[in-house]
């Protein structure tokens, strides 16, 4: 059974970090100090997907920009990638972002995931360059 959480407790945040560790640190070899770039004490918005009480997917929502929200650190544990978990997390993040009043969402995607975001209505903008230690592509989506 799948459960989506708007993270509001420490146990849920632990699930988010577990997913990111399995996906990015162990799965892709990204150093922990690069993956966990949150500023200590700052408040973040997170989405967590659990299946059968196990954390399997997560995302962070950044609302520090006035004219758009940014979905960041979208992660699905390796054994459940390409099974619809990422779609569930993005859809939940989009609902929350719309409730917050934003009409534009930005995602800077790893190159191999651009097709996934395009299938969800995001437009890749290779003309916009993003500084990152990992090659990324800027994508965006606007709501009416």
Image: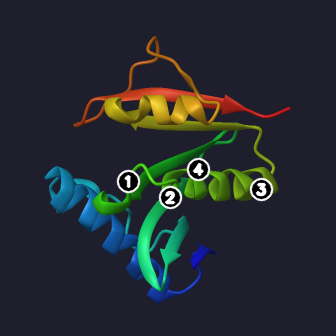
| Spatial separation of the CA atoms under disc 3 and disc 1 | 28 Å
- Residue 41 sits above or below residue 85 on the image: below
Nearest to the eye among marks 4 and 3: give it.
3
Query: Which marked residue is nearer to the observer: mark 4 or mark 2?
Result: 2
Q: Closer to the camera: disc 3 or disc 1?
A: 1
For marks 4 and 2, the one nearer the N-term is 4
Could you give the CA–CA distance between mark 3 and mark 2, rounded to whole angstroms? 23 Å
Question: Residue 61 appears at what percent x and percent y?
Answer: 56, 55
| Residue 121 numbered tag | none
Residue in the image at 39% along x and 81% along y: 14
Q: Which corner quadrant holds the N terminus? A: bottom right
**Image location (x, y in percent) of residue 12:** 49, 82
Q: Choose between 88 and 44: the one closer to the eye.
A: 88
Task: State whether residue 34 appears in this view.
Answer: yes
| Label 1 packing within 10 angstroms: few (<14), some (14-19), many (20+) | some
Is label 1 in a helix, a strand or a loop?
A: loop
Secondary structure beneath disc 2?
Answer: helix
- In the picture shown, does residue 143 fall above or below 47? above
The colour scheme used here is rainbow
Q: Are marks 1 and 2 in contact (CB under 8 Å)?
A: yes
User: Within 10 Å of the Cα at label 2, are there few (<14), some (14-19), or many (20+) other Cα atoms?
Assistant: many
Closer to the camera in the image, 69 or 4:
4
Which residue carries the number 2 mark? 85
Residue 81: image tag: 1
Report which residue position mark 3 lands on. 100
Which mark, residue 64? 4
Q: Earlier in the sequence, mark 3 or mark 2?
A: 2
């Amino acid at each position: 059974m799948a459960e989506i959480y708007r993270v509001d407790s420490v146990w849920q945040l632990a699930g988010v970090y577990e997913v990111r560790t399995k996906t990015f640190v162990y799965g892709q070899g990204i150093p922990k100090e690069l993956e966990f770039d949150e500023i200590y004490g700052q408040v973040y918005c997170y989405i967590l997907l659990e299946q059968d009480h196990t954390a399997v997917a997560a995302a962070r929502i950044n609302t520090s920009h006035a004219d758009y929200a940014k979905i960041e650190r979208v992660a699905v544990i390796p054994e459940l990638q390409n099974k619809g978990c990422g779609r569930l997390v993005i859809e939940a993040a989009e609902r929350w972002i719309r409730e917050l009043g934003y009409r534009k969402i930005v995602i800077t995607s790893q190159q191999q995931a651009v097709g996934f975001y395009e299938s969800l209505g995001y437009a890749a903008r290779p003309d916009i360059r993003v500084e990152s230690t990992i090659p990324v592509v800027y994508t965006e989506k606007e709501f009416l």
